[in-house]
Image (tube, coloured by chain):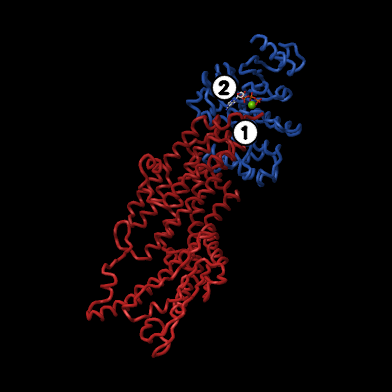
Chain colours: A blue, B red
Amino acid sequence: MPAVVVKDLWRSFGKKVVLRGVSFEVEEGEIFGLLGPNGAGKTTTLRIITGILRPHKGEVLVYGKRIPEEAEEVRRLTSYLPEESDVYLRLTGYENLKFFAMLYSDDPREIDEIVRKGAEIADIGDALGKPTKTYSKGMRRRLALARTLMVRPRLAILDEPTSGLDVYSSIKVRNIIKKFVEETKASVILSSHNMLEVEYLCHRVAFIADGRIIEVGTPEELKSHFGASNLEEAFVKAVEVAKGAA
Amino acid sequence: MQLKAMLWKEVKDLSRDRKTIFTAVFLPAFMLPLMAQLLVIAQKSSPVVVVVVNLDRGADVPAFVLQPLPLEAGGVQRVNLGLQVAKMIEESVLKVSPTARVLVLNSTKDVPYYNVLVVIPPDFSQKLLTLNPERFNRTRVEVYYRAGPGGLGIGATTIYQTIVTVLNYLSTQVFAKQRVEILLACCEVSGVPPEAVLSPIEVKTEYVSVTGQRISAAQLGKMLSAKLLLFSIFYVTVPVLAFVSDSVAGEKERKTLETLLASPIKRRNIVLGKFGAALVLGLIAAVADMAGLIAYIQIINTQMSVAQMGSMAFQLTLDPWIVLLHGLVMLLVIAATAAMLMPLVSLTDSVRSAQSVGGVVQMIPLLVILYAMYADITTVPMPWGALVYAIPHTYAVLAIDQALKGSWLGVVQSSLTMIGITAALIWVTIKIFESEVLVTSAFSFGRRRR
Ligand SMILES: Nc1ncnc2c1ncn2[C@@H]1O[C@H](COP(=O)(O)OP(=O)(O)OP(=O)(O)O)[C@@H](O)[C@H]1O
Ligand SMILES: [Mg+2]
């Protein structure tokens, strides 16, 4: 059974149609990349998978559970790192972790365990006891990622996890994600603009443009399909082909 | 557990929001005392000036006529009644307002700036002190009241009224009585009390409560001081708006909301946790407000003269029930305000737009309070009445009124209604949080990220 099944999602805002039949599947233990230009509908797709938004048509199954009917069960299995999301600035890093741990567990010992895991992932040392408004952007993003992964979700949904981070922070974040999947065999869906990141992290990639999935495959498959030397080139060609078809 | 977590986070967050805590404590605790202090300062810095111009030339009269005015010596005497009246006015004025200034002059030339001017005519003694009924006549004292600049002149009004009262007393109770006695003696009528001629209609006045029971002046004062509580309804809501907009719209603005919405916490618990934190803030504000009320009454009673506050001041009482009721009502007001703000604020996407929307909501109770200052809130005619009864603050006003009537059942009813409206609004908020409007809200159009 695939971890996630996304079938023919349609969604519009007012008159603007944003998703026009998005479908894909994600296997357990797989890192799946959504790659697409600004406004392609990546965030909208991810929001529908988390149950924050409703699709106007189509369906989503997460480990066999249907969105939005079984959204509550799905939320226990998933964890979401929204685009540009931040942490609570008046709380310390530690308190931020504790709050989210408390939402996932009732058992104080388990909460402590989760928080310890979070601290380990965030790896920001003594700063954890200080209010997060004193953190740098990279530290906050790492804390946010730690908060997302520490609860050991079966599916982690990461919307542009490295956006706005410098090279070193980005590498750290990527390694955290990679290690997480290796350790837990969980699935990850991530969106990105960064081809390098996608090539390094993702087992499979979907190109999305103008609300449609135009190509899906491993980075290798996509490159050879378009006769491109790198993913960037393949992406540009895929978009051109899609435009020609439309 | 989720609810506990939410409450824990919100209260922690709130406790570090100095600005909001400051307004929650400072505004209620210091606004009323500050208002009182300001009145005291205003009174001291611009005293009421009373000028009495005594043009009276005096008259020769037998001493016994002068009762009950101070008697200097027996026999026939040159008396300046005007001067004695001027002294009486001065004493009464200073009793009412120790900070007032009273000047007695004997010419209309070079009269300084005054708030109240009294002119006693040259024939004052002559006309009043005659014992011959055939020469009974009237004399005219002129009292000018300057409705000029410099505040509302509450103090000057009371002083002006005091002076008029003194003159009326002298006219009806002293000189008229004397004349009636003389006339009765002339008609050889005896055993008739002068009042039976002077005022055959006896007018008896009494303060009664709404339920028709006799109340003392002290109770009346209590009612008036309770009306002051209405001001608090307005300013205790200020920190609530700060908190609600920060806690609800702030989560959107600072991009923490979606994480929360995607977590396993039930939407209901998010709303209840935030509302619970608003109640904690409300409790702080209510306690601060009770302290402020006590300080207010203390300042008014110890530092303010009667004249400044008009008829209210002499009976401002510190009834523990009123103070307690005040605290309770403020807590309910804060809860209701939070519940009114939450659904609206959850549709905005920034703290700033939340605050401007909330500002409009805050004006609504102000209208109710203004109306209640002038009239009984239950008398609003129907199309408006329905509107007024939909506003939870109306019931705060009603509860205070009912407490003063001694109708505790009414207080409970009003309080329960307020709690009911609050619960309904919270329910609406939960529905909003359960729908996706929260993420796609109308107020966020055109403000999408780059
Ligand atoms: N709440 C909303 N109301 C109106 N339009 C919206 C809303 N959310 C998204 N859109 C529109 O939907 C389209 C897709 O947005 P989405 O955020 O899914 O794109 P994206 O692929 O994540 O882009 P980016 O790479 O810039 O993050 C955009 O044109 C956006 O303007
Ligand atoms: Mg996006």
Q: Amino acid at mark 2?
A: Val
Which mark is on residue B220? none
Q: Residue furthest right?
A: A229
- Whether callout 1 and callout 2 share a subunit is answered yes
Q: Judge whether residue B74 can be spotted in this image.
A: yes
Ligand 2: give its quadrant. Answer: top right
Q: Nearer the viewer, residue B217 or B204?
A: B204
Above or below, B271 relative to B329: above
Above or below, B137 relative to A62: below
Task: Name the chain letter of the residue that bears numbered label 2.
Answer: A
Q: Nearer the viewer, residue B417 or A179?
A: B417
Q: Amino acid at mark 1?
A: Leu
* Residue drawn at the location 56% of the way across and 25% of the way down: A49
* Residue drawn at the location 39% of the way across and 90% of the way down: B74
Query: What SS does tag 1 mark?
Result: helix
Q: Is mark 2 within 8 Å of ligand 1?
A: no
